[in-house]
Image (cartoon, rainbow, N blue to C red):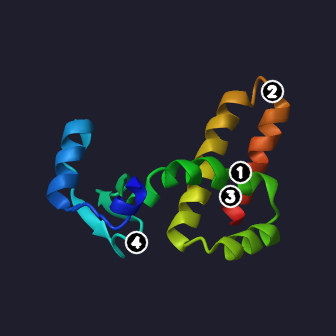
Amino acid sequence: MVAGRTAGIRPRIDEVLVRRLVDTQFPQWAELVLEPVEPTCSDHVIYRLGEQPAARLPCHAGAIGQARKEYEWLPRLFTLMSPTSRAAFRDALGVDDASWLRGRGWALATGLNAYTTYAAVDPRVAAQTSRRITQALIG
């Protein structure tokens, strides 16, 4: 079984690797300072790039695809669940602070993008996205 042989393997992810990836894939960020975010490598290694962006790399096979799931599902929680329900859901899943904050950020970003797109053309969608924005700001 492949998973059994690779489950304990963790790639070496250091500043040299992250710098090379950033410089190659995002040359517009090549001059930004890299700063590691602690703790490192429970599931991901994260390097802050200057003030805003960050590089997030999975450090084991089980973490591959996690970011996509967080991006897809966490923002929905801020649209579909009350603050009390969100807190219970978060506690039940054991979602860490960093993932929860990313979810709030994605909920806010997707809500703002959708609102600016639909405000003038679809009031129903604008109302839904307005709710998402409000709930993301509440937490």
Looking at the picture, tell me which residue is in the foreground, 77 or 125.
77
Q: Quadrant of residue 54?
A: bottom left
Lower sequence index among marks 1 and 4: 4
Give the spatial CA distance, label 4 vs label 3: 26 Å
Find disc 4 in the rendering and name its residue.
Answer: 42
Q: Look at the image and tell me whether residue 30 can be seen.
A: no
The answer to which of marks 2 and 4 sits earlier in the sequence is: 4
Residue drawn where x is 41% and y is 57% of the image: 3
Q: Identify the disc placed on residue 45.
A: none
Asked whether, in this view, residue 91 is left or right of residue 103, the answer is right
In the rendered image, the vertical position of residue 44 relative to residue 121, given as above or below: below
State how far apart marks 3 and 2 are (Cα): 21 Å
| Vertical comparison of 9 with 119: above or below | below
Q: CA distance from mark 2 to mark 4?
A: 42 Å
Q: CA distance from mark 1 to mark 3?
A: 10 Å
- The residue identified by callout 3 is 136
Q: Residue furthest front?
A: 1
Label 1 close to label 3 by CB (< 8 Å)? no
Spatial separation of the CA atoms under disc 1 and disc 4: 25 Å
* Cβ atoms under marks 3 and 2 closer than 8 Å: no
Q: Answer yes or no: is residue 91 visible.
A: yes
Helix, strand, or loop for circle 3? helix
The amino acid type, in three-letter code, at marker 1 is: Arg
Report which residue position mark 2 lands on: 122
